[in-house]
Amino acid sequence: MSNPDNPLLKVAQLAVHYPGKAVVHDLNFALAEGEIGCLLGPSGCGKTTALRTIAGFERPAGGMVQIGGDEVAGPSKFIQPEKRKVGMVFQDFALFPHLSVAANVAFGLRGLSRSEQKQRVAELLDLVGLADRAACYPHQLSGGQQQRIALARALAPRPRLLLLDEPFSSLDSDLRAQLAAEVRAILTREGITALLVTHDQHEAFAMADRIGVMHQGRLDQWADGYTLYHRPATRFVADFIGEGVLLPGEADGNGMAATELGRVHLAPGIATQRGPVEVLLRPDDLTLHSDGPLHAEVTARAFRGAEYLYTLRLPSGARALALMPSHHHQAVGSRTALRLTHEALPGFIAHGQIP
Amino acid sequence: MATPDEQGWCRADGSGVACGGSWRLDDAPMLERQLARLKPADAGAIDATAITALDSAGALLLNDLVVRLGLGVGAVDGLRSEQRALLDLVARHHPSERELPGLSREGALASLGRNAWVHWEQATRFIHFVGEVSLVLLGTLLHPSRIRWSAFARTLETAGFQAMPILALLSFLMGVVIAYQGGQQLANYGANIFIVELVSLTMVRELAPLLTAIIVAGRTGSAFTAQIGTMVVTEEVDAMRTIGISPMELLVLPKIFGLVLAMPLLALFADMVSVFGGMVMARFILDVSFSEFLDRIPDILSLTSFLIGIGKVPVFAAVVAVVGCFQGFQVQGDADSVGRQTTVSVVQAIFLVILVDAFFSVVLGGMGL
């Protein structure tokens, strides 16, 4: 089904300009059928503009968008959103307040006969688990329920692609994680291709198969969560995703670097570079261990439930983070031994330039 | 080593400026006088090694000095790290005062140009919108199944039927006023019976259609803008488009159709009520009885005059509906903008209605009608 040569959504060299400024530059990515993608980034990075361009609300200044092999926006072509067959879910739900839940879901089903409409609405309300609320009005439902209705409404006309614009941002944080998991389950069960936009990395990890980190209108990296976390392509990705520190080191040009924590393998990318580098150390790359070869002082620790996050001062004064199961106890101010759990670490050329 | 309480000072030292002592709020007046003596020619490195104490007031002064000498904060040497952090913070949040006036003051010519440009752009967008509406209108007339009858009926009810009481009251009063003002003059000449011409011609041919258009613009045009504008803000319009429904077909056309049908009926109603108002006044101050009044109407009110009056109204209706819908789609961002566009919608609709009416007068006058 999913053919990488013939993706369902293809975005190539997409550029979007607002009067006087460029918002998105040279955006390239593709989604296979049934895949869930995510554009992740801080506010103002252009992710929502990119999504709205795919939906058809903005006209690109360059590049093209293909959905299901048809060009919907390109140098000589622009298809209106009404004709693109994409569904969209909005941050503030955008339900029609004067229509009942069932009428909201049926809104996009104009071509069908009354009984077909009724059947499709029942099917979708069942899918989102709100079959008993068909006669309610949107204001009678909770935020999470409203967003599920919005999802049902977007899916009703069987769109080729579903777009979600910060769909969980106006919900409580508890509900957010739960709904993200539910929505992912619904989408994967139905085999729906979807693209999500969010500034919340946990939401992105919970929902998406592939995540693109956007920064100042550019896509820094398009990969799965593990790769973004442990093999970030740029300093911005390293900084934006998760926690960690950059430790100075000296690369030898053969894929190794000497650091305060000993010699580490540099992850591919700058392996052949020589000279000063900075190595990304994630909290789970270090473990406190009584017979570890290295020593440090505990300067702070934060309880995270299952874990403690320790902040350590290495002998040189550099800072490092380590994540330990919460049963492990090490007092603040004490000295501790530690070891690296993982020796292939991503490195960046020291002082600024993105490799 | 200087004592912490040494008074703040600064002076030119040949290669730049040297500063020292306490740079705190209490020292500020002193320091300001000393700083005023420094000239841009003294620019160079600023040696701050001797500064013993620095608070935010001192940091502000130091920042002003840096800016006045045309340097960056990097030119200050010898600050301790916490003092440096304070200076950086101040420099970041306190742009030099001389930068500000340039930013806030725009020449009259520049703002005239900017305003002209904004209006030009809006006019272009309006013409674009009218074109789009015309295309969709044509498409819908070719495929009548796409007409949204329920939305059409709702417009008829809210814009037509529900406008009748207010329109009745205002047209009646208008008839009363015209009859009263004109009647006093006519009575001077004993030409009381001409009140029929005065009231029925003025009202039917000119004033009742205009009054209807103005009331509908204020009542319904603004409601169109507010409704569409709110739907733009809540992204309902976007949601509608992604599920394949054109806002033009669902939101705009039924309003135009509804108003184009309802407003001539309203104008006809206003014709009758305002003439009745004039009739009542004529009875009381001019002793023209109802039967005399009614007898005379068919003699002086030609079918042409009546048709000209009513015939203008669908055009007014289209103007009010299109402007109302257009301004609704111009809403951007927040609820504030809904209010702004609603006001603009009413002002523009009334302006255009009067403009169109003047145009009709000139053209019809030219044709000798």
Image (tube, grey):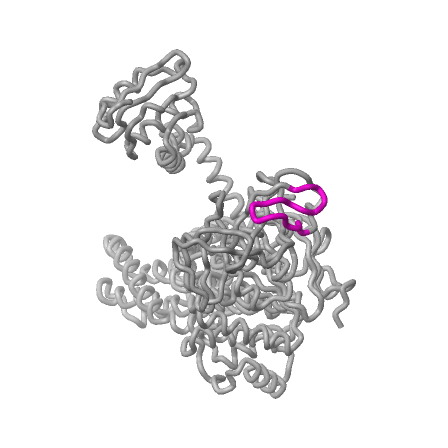
> Considering only vertical position in the picture, is B219 above or below A186?
above
Question: What is the x, y in percent for residue A19?
Answer: 56, 44
Residue for point 30% across, 35% down? B56
- Give the percent coordinates (x, y) of residue A11: 69, 57
Q: Magenta span has A260?
A: yes
- In the rendered view, tell whether residue B35 sits above or below residue A74: above
Q: Is A289 on the left-hand or right-hand side of A109?
A: left
User: Which residue is the extreme one toward the top?
Assistant: B14
Give the left or right position of residue B71, taking residue B176 as reference. right
Foreground residue, A339 or B337?
A339
Residue that lies at the very extreme toward the right in this rendered image? A5
Residue A324: give x, y in percent of width and height. Answer: 49, 63
The stretch of residues the image draws in magenta is A251-267
Q: Can residue B152 be seen in this view?
A: no
Query: Is residue A177 or residue A322 the one in the foreground?
Result: A322
Q: Residue at x 52, y 43 (%)?
A: B120
Q: Where is residue A140 in the image (x, y as percent from the top left)?
A: 41, 78
The quadrant in which residue A139 appears is bottom left
The secondary structure making up most of the magenta span is strand
Q: Residue at x 66, y 69 (%)?
A: A193
- Please name whichever residue, B36 or A245, is drawn nearer the observer in this view of the structure: A245
| Residue A264 vertical position relative to residue A155 in the rendered view, above or below | above
Asked if residue A112 can be seen in this view, the reply is yes
Tell me if A177 is positioned left or right of A273 in this view: left
Q: Does the magenta stretch include residue A117?
A: no
